[in-house]
Structure formats: structure tokens, C-alpha cells
Image: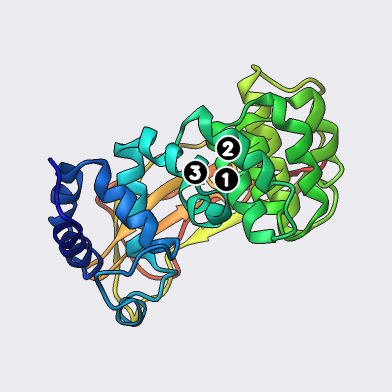
Amino acid sequence: MDLAHEAIDGLLTDYLYGDDRALDGLLAAGPASLRRLLAIRAGRAEPGWDMAEIVRRDRDDYRRPLEAQIHLARAFPDTFFDEVAEDPAQESVFMETLEYIKDPRALPFLERQLRTRSPECRRRALRGLAENGSADHTEAVAACLADPETRSEAVDTLARLGDVRAVGPLLREHLADDSSFARCAGAALDQVEQRIGGPLVPPAWRELGPAVFTAQAVMGVPWCVAEVLVEPGQTVRGGELMAVLENDAICQELIADWPGTVTEVRIAVGDEVPEEAVLLVVQSRRRIG
């Protein structure tokens, strides 16, 4: 249905001030709601709300306006990309959304933004390529490994689309040191190799010894074991969830810091465990080649 700008602005105002029900009205209003929001965010139209007040209420980088834009762009992608093509000067406004939309029409914009000087634009482009790119983008993404500003996003993107034959040697160059990035590079290489059914060359590992997982101290409150997801002899990946504890206040997740083999499981679902009790032991290792 077609609504006047005043009616759309009213729905946008309600949504931006936290009323999620207004989104249904915006979607029912059709593409006009997306065009109106893009015009306001690009500075081509006066908003129907006080942006300063929105910022005071929502300091997370204009989260509500961006959320509205993402929802409407997903609902009306043809309108979104028509608007992008008509107003390239406002590409930064559109780029905030491209990383959340899986559509091949996003690729020319993402590829162009990957060559800009702005680290934030390049990071967004890398996240968008993780959704929309292919192995053909491996070389361009791998080039971002050399820049500390974009290294983390480049690794995540390569893990999802990189060709292991091309990126494997590049990632292995970063495995030998003890930095947190080495762990990210190793995890990315594992993901890439899993997509082709295994490593091209046998990986090299450094044994780190046993890692002991305990129940954290929370003012003397005991924990109850809610889930146990591993057993002795099981191999785990870095970042893998192994067990969940809970009490009346919070939850605690036991997550493997590094790959390894579970050697001891001293808990079962339903057990009550005191703080600092040893729950799991993992023989950890780190990939170095």
C-alpha cells in the first residue's frame, strides 16, 4: 500500500524509539518506506524524528536506523539496489547494509570499497564478500592480511571463501608466533581445508600441554552442570563449546582455547560443583605449519 511521507515518518519514528511492532507497518508500506529511510539517512530529506535524541538513547552506532535499513533492504532488494545505483555519492550509507545482504548485485560495490583508503569501509567490504564473494576474490582478500587494520576480517572472509591452494601458504606464514592472530589464522586454515575434505599437506603442531578447566568463582555460589558435550579421547577445535554450567544468576561456558584432545571429564549433567573445582582437562596443541 502507498502511504504519505508523514505516515511513513511516524512508523520510522516509532521503530527508532524502540517499538518493534512498527516494522510490520513499514513492510506493509512497501518500497516507499525504504526509499524514505535511505533519503533521510543520506541527508536528502528531513527526518521525522530528532536524530540527536535517537543518538542519546541508542549510542551503538545508530543501531536502530541501521536495523530498519537492513530489514527493509532484505524485504525490497530491487528497490535497494536501484537506489544504490542512482546515488553513488552516498555509497557509505548503503555499505552499512551490503554486508548483511546475500545478493550478487552487491559485489561491484564491495569490490570497489575494498580498494578505498578507509579501514572501516574495507572491513565492511570484507564482511560483505564473506556473504557474497567466491574463491575468485581470494587474491584481493588475501592482500588485506598485510594490513593490521583489516587482518581480522580478511582471515574470517578467507575461512569462508578462500581457495586453500592459494591462501594456505599465506596463512601458514602467520602460524609460528604466539600472537592471537596466529590462533585466528590456524582456525581459518582449518575451516578452509575442511571445505575441500582435508589438508593438502600434513599440518605441523606444537604441543602446549594440559589445559585445566575449572568452575569460576562467583561469591561462593555452587554451579550445576547443564550440558556436557565432550568425552575422554574426543578431539576438539579451538573455540569449541565443551560444557555449560549454570546457577541462579548466570551461565558459564567452557570453551576450548586451542585444538586438542580431551583427557579427563570429571562432571556429568546434573552434578553440583563448587567454585574452582577441576571439571575438564584437555591436552592442547597449536598449529604452527
Residue at image mark 3: 86
Q: Position of residue 73 (x, y in %)?
A: 36, 43
Mark 3 surroundings: few (<14), some (14-19) or many (≥20) residues within 10 A = few
Nearer to us in this view, 224 or 141: 141
Q: Position of residue 117 (x, y in %)?
A: 75, 58
Nearer to us in this view, 8 or 141: 8
Q: Quadrant of the N terminus?
A: top left
Q: Position of residue 226 (x, y in %)?
A: 28, 51
Query: Which quadrant of the structure image shows residue 16?
Result: bottom left
Q: Amino acid at mark 1?
A: Arg
Q: Secondary structure at mark 3?
A: helix
Query: Among all residues in the image, which is located at the extreme top?
Result: 197
Gap in Å between the C-alphas at discs 1 and 2? 5 Å
Assess whether mark 2 and mark 1 are in contact (beta carbons under 8 angstroms). yes
Q: Which numbered circle lies on residue 130?
A: 2
Q: Which numbered circle lies on residue 220?
A: none
Q: Amino acid at mark 2?
A: Ala
Q: Is residue 15 above or below residue 77?
A: below
Give the label, 2 or 3, closer to the camera: 3
Q: Quadrant of the C terminus?
A: top right
Nearer to us in this view, 259 or 76: 76
| Residue sitting at x 29%, y 75% | 221
| Residue sitting at x 68%, y 25% | 135
Residue at image mark 1: 127
Q: Secondary structure at mark 1?
A: helix
Evaluate whether residue 198 shows in this view. Answer: yes
| Residue sitting at x 67%, y 52% | 122
| Residue sitting at x 51%, y 40% | 85
Q: Amino acid at mark 3?
A: Glu
Q: Is residue 58 left or right of residue 249?
A: right
Evaluate whether residue 261 shows in this view. Answer: no
